[in-house]
């Protein structure tokens, strides 16, 4: 449970405009969809995917790094790492199982299978969308464990897009259609409070000193 007194204390350090901005952004956040990125060698692409999640309202991104241990490219992410939840996994098995336990269907994005076209994708189902490496695509484990496959319609000679471009197209499409649906896609009241608290802590300078002052009372 969130300490509401603590939240009120921290939000006292924010401007009214900042607090209202948090509430406006959070009203458009969702955990109905989540994104998983598997072993992307060029990590600026993962940072760009994270930025798309933030811009289009997906609250969580799951990063699997069992081969390439790299850090978020903060210049590409443009601060998105402060506003989305980043779950890191050392192997794909744990990632898939964790997401299935949360009730997500596993959707592999790939142009090579008899995949569902993007505009036909059922946005009413709680889904975790997986994106793979630039050259190899998703691993065999993801492909075999997937509950469905998804692709972007293409009419040119090139059969694939850069991962960050593919993610941006897919995320924008499914989140737009989700908000036009009758699905209860918004964050729960508890999740909203959790994000308000976390975002306040991420915003306030010298947060450790501020926290120490609160708990010393």
Image: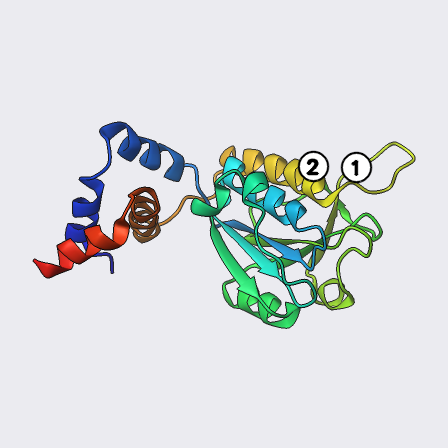
The numbered mark at residue 153 is 1
Q: Please name the residue shown 39% across and 47% down the image.
A: 187
The C terminus is located in which quarter?
Answer: bottom left
Q: Please name the residue shown 33% across and 42% down the image.
A: 203
Q: Please name the residue shown 82% across and 42% down the image.
A: 160
The answer to whether the residues at label 1 and label 2 have Cβ atoms under 8 Å apart is: yes
Please state the horizontal and vertical placement of residue 134, each as a whole percent of the image. Answer: 77, 50
How did the renderer colour the structure? rainbow
Please state the horizontal and vertical placement of residue 82, each as a whole percent of the image. Answer: 43, 46
Q: Would residue 184 be visible to someone looking at this image? A: no
The foreground one among 210 and 160 is 210
Q: Please name the residue shown 78% across and 40% down the image.
A: 161
Tell me which label, 1 or 2, sits earlier in the chain: 2
Tag 1, which secondary structure?
Answer: loop
Q: Tell me where residue 152 sits by quadrant.
A: top right
Tag 2, which secondary structure?
Answer: helix
Q: Tell me where residue 20 sits by quadrant.
A: top left
Gap in Å between the C-alphas at discs 1 and 2? 9 Å
Q: Mark 1: give few (<14), some (14-19) or many (20+) Cα within 10 Å.
A: few
Residue 162, placed above or below residue 90 = above
Image-based side of 70 in relation to 180, left or right: right
Residue under pointer 2: 119
The numbered mark at residue 78 is none
Q: Would residue 65 be visible to someone looking at this image? A: yes
Image-based side of 114 in relation to 50, left or right: right
Q: Mark 2: give few (<14), some (14-19) or many (20+) Cα within 10 Å.
A: some
Residue 9, placed above or below residue 27 = below
Q: Nearer the viewer, mark 1 or mark 2?
A: 1
Please state the horizontal and vertical placement of residue 119, each as a whole percent of the image. Answer: 69, 37
The N terminus is located in which quarter?
Answer: bottom left
Outermost residue toward the right? 157
């Amino acid at each position: 449970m969130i300490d509401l007194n603590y939240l009120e204390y921290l939000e006292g350090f924010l401007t009214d405009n900042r607090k209202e901005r948090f509430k406006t952004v959070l009203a458009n956040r969702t955990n109905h969809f989540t994104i998983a990125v598997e072993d992307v060698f060029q990590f600026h692409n993962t940072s760009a995917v994270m930025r798309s999640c933030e811009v289009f309202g997906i609250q969580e991104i799951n990063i699997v790094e069992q081969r390439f241990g790299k850090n978020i490219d903060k210049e590409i992410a443009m601060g998105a790492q402060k506003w989305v939840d980043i779950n890191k996994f050392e192997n794909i098995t744990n990632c898939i199982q964790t997401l299935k336990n949360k009730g997500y269907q596993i959707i592999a994005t790939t142009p090579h299978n008899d995949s569902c076209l993007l505009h036909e994708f059922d946005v009413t189902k709680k889904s975790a969308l997986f994106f793979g490496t630039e050259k190899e695509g998703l691993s065999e484990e993801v492909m075999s464990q997937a509950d469905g496959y998804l692709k972007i319609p293409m009419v040119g000679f090139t059969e694939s897009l850069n991962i960050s471009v593919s993610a941006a197209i897919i995320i924008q499409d499914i989140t737009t259609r989700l908000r036009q649906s009758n699905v209860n896609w918004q964050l729960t009241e508890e999740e909203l409070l959790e994000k308000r608290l976390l975002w306040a802590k991420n915003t306030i300078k010298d947060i450790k000193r501020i926290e120490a002052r609160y708990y010393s009372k």
